[in-house]
Amino acid sequence: SGKIIDGKEIANSIHESLKNEIEELKSKTDKVPGLAVILVGDDKASHKYVSMKEKACKKVGINSVVYRLDANTTEEEVLELIDKLNKDEDINGILVQLPLPNGIGEKKINANILPSKDVDGFHAVNTGKLFLGEEGFLPCTPKGIIKLIKSTDIEIEGKNAVVIGRSNIVGKPTALLLLRENATVTICHSRTRNLEEHIRNADIIVSAAGVADLVTETMVKDKAIVIDAGINFKDGKLVGDVDYINVKKKASWITPVPGGVGPMTIAMLLENTVEAFKKKWS
Ligand code: NAD
């Protein structure tokens, strides 16, 4: 039976070292990193995620400022706020929680955040750098996924990796990062034929589709590493994309949901914010 990649524990140890680093930075610069979070509307999950991010900031000593704006906030108002935060020296990172209400364009919003404060890594400058293999802010979930895979000490180079999902937030950047690690990468998506055939060849499976029970035991190669980024509700319970109990029997390593990719996403947000701070002040 496979071993569990404990995302919560790995995230906690990252929090610990960030906390120490922030204390040191504070003693040198007399400043602490600042993260601004903009949340528009009343999406319940978004409110929960933002509270979790706020709590994590507090834990490590990042100053977080959350703007909870009501659902009829205009795009222009959000852009004005971003402009103000772009100019604010005490703010090192700006995050706009997605999804945005209708009428506020995600593209426009992302494009207006200064790339040097784009700790979510969604600005075209940072995604372009990811494409080119240059240094920039990496999107948090993909960055966390790579760290989870690396925590197993199994080499990525030369392995067959299958990423299920091709979104700009998770699937596509994860595939690029695996490519950077010299994996042979296959990207599967909703139009993929014979998903199972692709998955069966994979030494590393990353699922980011948002479909419960998409990845089942019979599809998975013996000793595969299985990373489950999915967040779904099934019978009132939070589950990923992977039939965890059964796939675990076959995998060498597997992430649970919750407690896998989720906590790492937040840890990477904190890491990116500290990185932004250091680029500015040290
Ligand atoms: P998305 O809806 O933008 O993209 C889903 C992708 O999965 C699409 O590219 C689609 O083609 C593919 N897909 C859908 N059904 C499929 C199927 N049956 N077979 C193969 N491919 C299929 O979602 P997203 O923003 O990329 O997020 C993906 C999942 O990861 C969601 O469940 C989301 O909640 C979760 N997520 C988790 C975190 C985290 O921190 N844990 C962060 C972001 C997203």
Image (cartoon, helix red, strand yellow):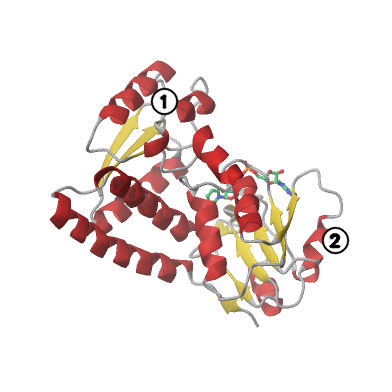
Front residue of 276 and 68: 276
41 horizontally vs 89: left or right: right
Left or right relative to 147: residue 131: right
Which residue position holds label 2? 197
Q: Quadrant of the image for the N terminus? A: bottom right
Q: Residue furthest bottom?
A: 1
Q: Is residue 80 above or below residue 272?
A: above
Which residue in the structure is indicated by mark 1? Answer: 71
Q: Is residue 70 left or right of residue 228?
A: left
Secondary element type, mark 2: helix
- Please provide percent x and percent y for residue 18: 30, 61
Numbered tag placed on residue 171 in the rendering: none
Residue drawn at the location 74% of the way across and 47% of the way down:
189
**Distance in Å between CA atoms under marks 1 and 2:** 44 Å
Measured as percent of width and height from the top left, residue 14 is found at 37, 65
- Give SS at disc 1: loop
Q: Is residue 125 left or right of residue 57?
A: right
- Asked if one can make out residue 123 in the rendered structure from this viewpoint, the answer is no
Q: Residue at x 24, y 64 (%)?
A: 20
Query: Residue 107 at what x, y percent from top left?
Result: 53, 27
